[in-house]
Amino acid sequence: MDILIQNEITRQVDDLFFSIRQKTIENARDIDVAWMIITGTIGFSVVSGVIFVEVGKVAPKNVITTIFKNLLCIAIAAISFWFIGYSFAFGKDRTGFIGDDGRSSIGVAKVHNGAGTGCLDLLRLYPEKVWISPCNVRGSDGWENWFFFWVYTAAATLAATYGLGERTKIAAYVMFVVIFTLFIHPIVMHWVWGNGWLSAWGAYPDSNGVVRPIFHYNSRSNGLIDHGGGAVVHIVAGTTSLVCTLLLGPRKARFAENASVYPGNPFITSLGVLFQCFGWYGLLCGSSWRISSGHGDIAAKVAVNTTISTAGGVMIATIVELVFNKSFSLPPVLNSVLTSLVSISAGASVVDPWMAFLIGAVSPIIYNAGRAILLFFKVDDVCEGINIYGSAGLWGLWSVGIFCTDKNVRYAGYPNVNTACEKGEQLGVQLLGSLTIIAWTAGISFFTIAFIDNTLGIRPTDKIEDDGLDLNNFGYTMEHVMHERDPTATKDEPAGLQPAEASETNGGNVNATADLYNSSRSSKKVSIVGDTVYSRFPPPPPQTVLSQTSVQPLGSVNGLSYLPPANPQFVYRSIPSYSGSVPPRISVETAAVDPILYRSGGGLTGQNFY
């Protein structure tokens, strides 16, 4: 009887401990899944920020096209990564080069379209294998992993297409994005984060499942260390942007004598940088891949190093501006935030905070050197993605080999225990990996752009570039939108606008023309108060031009033609031609009807922005 009671007690205790262990595993799994979803969602701010930065830097005549193509890019990245890209990245390794799910030539099966494998059912059916099951290794069926790495793919794609800015047909852009998200980027992701030949997480396993990281192909080596995308995202994006920029050539008249460069919108650009800064914490901290079982310490360390690196970059950029230019400047500080974030991405988990400071502090110097080289060779990097992502990403990947310690590598959870950092081997791995990734990305991007150019044609005509891509693609521009009457305007002057400075006239030579603006597209509404001329932007390109004989000037004073109004309640004055990089501004006196705006001396044209 005593033996029976003892056996029953033992059985109940075992059942209790099994239930506790199972519940603990289930809770840890849920926490890890939630961690990936939350950090991936926060990380999507990087995608939003990349769009804002590009919108802030392109000319107003191309803003709508820029927004549209980036939104299209996000959708294409999702479909491509779901359809086959995820399998190429994280499927079963094939010769160290590419992944495959082993069940489908298409690859959709890697992301389950049904109910999944049901990790909880597996745990109940095979409790003795709980510590080696895919549920424990991956944390779930894999839904959250797809989502998290899709965010990385979308960010890389948007940054890579910086090189196509302001001079690419939408159809050509779509074709390039499809190839980039299906093939170019997932292959690198497999090399580094999957089971590819560069991976630190189970590189190139042999037929017995024994992993073979370079250089020693055993546990004496780590493989390439890239915690948060220094190579997988930023070097790939920067290299792609460089190839696109070189093959497309500069924007029309960008390097012409006395060419005016659009200075950008500092508010929108700043907003984009802040969005990216916020999202970076999500992606880098989330790249711990788990938050349970001690991984929270890794995520916390990554957050600290990211902050210190960014602060170091901002401080050095500010000091450099003060020393060399004797003044403060916003653009260098904004660029330093991005370059320092990019630089710390690869090594955020394997360096100490003082090392992170040095990595971030060096990044603005590398950026400025790279920018000077591009300008010297007249490379038109519209959004400066080549240096912000490419040069800074290269420095960040190399800095892992320079600053990493073997103790930090083990602390970050990398599987092999060795002295690769101490012996300098890790620096060699980082160098080899970066050069190989650059060669792969540049080669495939080159052939892709060349193929698109010879089939669809990649650049629009000179006239379309002059008028702006928005007018050709959508029939209107931001200039049309912004010429809508300001609802806060007073009778004397609309809020937020200042009188234009004195402009040149045509010396009394009246050559009256008229631009008829489509009222359905936010027509220009103009009225003149005394001799003061106001305007938000130069008027959009005319849709209809009336000949001189179709209007009868009431008279002219100092080259200004007074013409019949479109509505007898108002008198509209023509606007003199002007020169200079800043256009005059035109205000709305009252709530006017859609008028015909008459112009003299060739009209309000000014210089084109490039």
Image: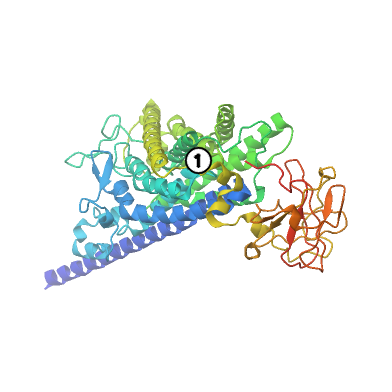
Which quadrant would residue 432 be assigned to in this image?
A: top left
Q: What residue is disc 1 on?
A: 163
Give x and y (percent) for residue 300. 48, 49
Seen in the picture, residue 476 relative to 335 is either above or below; the reply is below
196 sits to left or right of 237: left
Q: In the figure, is residue 320 to the left or right of 428?
A: right
In the image, residue 158 above or below residue 96: below
Circle 1: residue type: Gly
Question: Which residue occupies the foreground of this view, 278 or 469?
Answer: 469
Q: Nearer the viewer, residue 267 or 21?
A: 267
| SS type, badge 1 | helix
In-image side of 331 versus 166 (left or right): right
Residue furthest to the bottom: 1
The answer to whether one can see residue 278 in this image is no
Question: Residue drawn at (33%, 35%), measured in percent from left and top?
Answer: 222
Residue 480 lies in quadrant = bottom right
Residue 475 in view in this figure? yes
| Observer-nearest of 444 and 296 | 444
Percent x, y of residue 201: 31, 42
Q: Which quarter shows the N terminus?
A: bottom left
How many numbered marks, from 0 up?
1
